[in-house]
Image (spheres, rainbow, N blue to C red):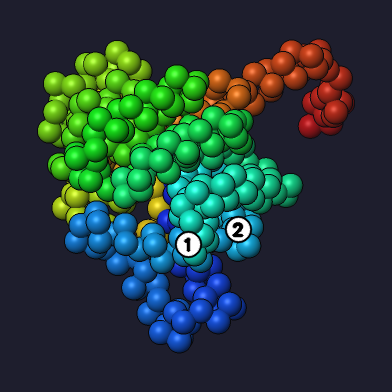
Amino acid sequence: MALYAELHRHLGGSVVPRVLWRYFHRSGDALANRFPDYTEFEEFYTRPRNTLDEYLELHTLVEKVQTEETLPYFVYRLMRGAYIFENLAYLELRYTPYLRTPDHLSQSERIDAMVQVVETVSKASQVGEYPIVMGQILCMHSRLPYEVNRAIVDLAAQMQPHVCAVDLAGGDAHYRDRLDEFVELYAYARSLGLKTTGHLYETTEGCYPELLPYLMRIGHGIQIPLLHPDLLGEIAARNQCLEVCPTTYLKTGTLESVHQLKTVFDRCFEAGVEIAICTDNAGLHNVRLPFEYENLLTHNIIDFEQLQACQAAAFRHAFAWPYGKHPASILTSALSETRAESVPLTQATPLIDTESLSQSV
Ligand SMILES: [Zn+2]
């Protein structure tokens, strides 16, 4: 069995439609009346949107029900699905903790309540029967004030190793007016020893070269090979990996066809820029990681060798995978050690007496 690493998945978008629909019905949420029938809910929840902003609106639907009390319900189901259906050995789960705190509290009370959210996610993700190495990424958000984003960075530093990095989310078109602020926050995060990724160069509106030097990985980054291939050399030199989430670009209207991704992969391979293939919002898309792999193969965007290179890159660029290499290579070395220790097959006593067998023929 192949084991995979998922580097870009949002807690909000990771709830598969059936789990969310059941939750609405079990908890008597108003949406249960609006969608008595599951099929209609799935259609509403997973249909493509026209823009990234419209698509991100859907996250608010899930964020408001992911409270400290309900998070264990959702995280447990997420880990179970990831283990059983996706063969994940490693998962980085990202979210904005502030948006999971009660909104009737003051800003400073909500900031104080964030630590509890991180602890809850951490505890809920340790599911004995579904063992997956998991790290949390805390997302700063383009629509939150500076004080909250800075508190998110501080919390990430305080909550290591449960938290493995910080991110910036909320739609990359919205960073422009506050670019200096985000540069400063990323520099601050790096000064605290935090690892960094950021939603950047996802849309044509989100191309900010000023932020690139602060990132260890780039969330999406597809507009770099598509519109700014001149940057690929420096991206390769910094060993920055792109987190490419194929289904997202079709759901957000960023790309018209999955075939446009062939240019992304071809130019990155040529320039030596590594790509981790990710799901972004597996639940919202109703798509699991092995499907993303297979879909790229089916559409001839990459071949098997390139797929395996991307799968290995995901483990290499993982922020909290402690083993350095892909689990398959760990198993291969374990197997060769076992074989070396055991009696060589040629010297072993045969289970069947071949001599008497040959005489009896
Ligand atoms: Zn994302």
Question: How many residues crowd mark 1 within 10 Å: few (<14), some (14–19), many (20+)?
Answer: few
Give residue 74's position: percent from left, percent from top.
58, 60
Q: Residue at x 27, y 25 (%)?
A: 212
Query: At label 2, which amino acid type do we have?
Result: Glu
The percent position of residue 247, horizontal first and vertical second, equals 31, 51
Which three-letter amino acid code belongs to the residue tagged 1? Asp
Q: Is residue 269 left or right of residue 229?
A: right
Q: Which mark is residue 280?
A: none
The reply to whether the residue tagged 1 has its Cβ within 8 angstroms of ligand 1 is: no
Q: CA distance from mark 1 to mark 2?
A: 12 Å
Q: Is residue 65 visible?
A: yes
Q: Quadrant of the C terminus?
A: top right
Q: For the point 48% across and 56% down, which residue is it? A: 106
Residue 347 occupies which quadrant of the picture? Answer: top right
| SS state under label 1 | loop
Which numbered mark, 1 or 2, is in the foreground of this view? 1
Q: Quadrant of residue 283?
A: bottom left
The residue carrying mark 2 has its beta carbon less than 8 Å from ligand 1:
no
Residue identifier under label 1: 103
* The one of 160 and 145 positioned closer to us in this rendering: 145
Residue to which mark 2 is pinned: 68
Q: Is residue 237 left or right of residue 284?
A: left
- In the picture, which quadrant includes the N terminus? top right
80 vs 139, left or right, is right
**Which is more toward the observer, 123 or 226?**
123
Would you say residue 203 is visible in this rendering?
no
Asked whether 85 or 5 is in front, the reply is: 5
Within 10 Å of disc 2 (Cα), the crowding (few <14, some 14-19, many 20+) is some
Question: Residue at the location (24% across, 34% down)?
Answer: 179
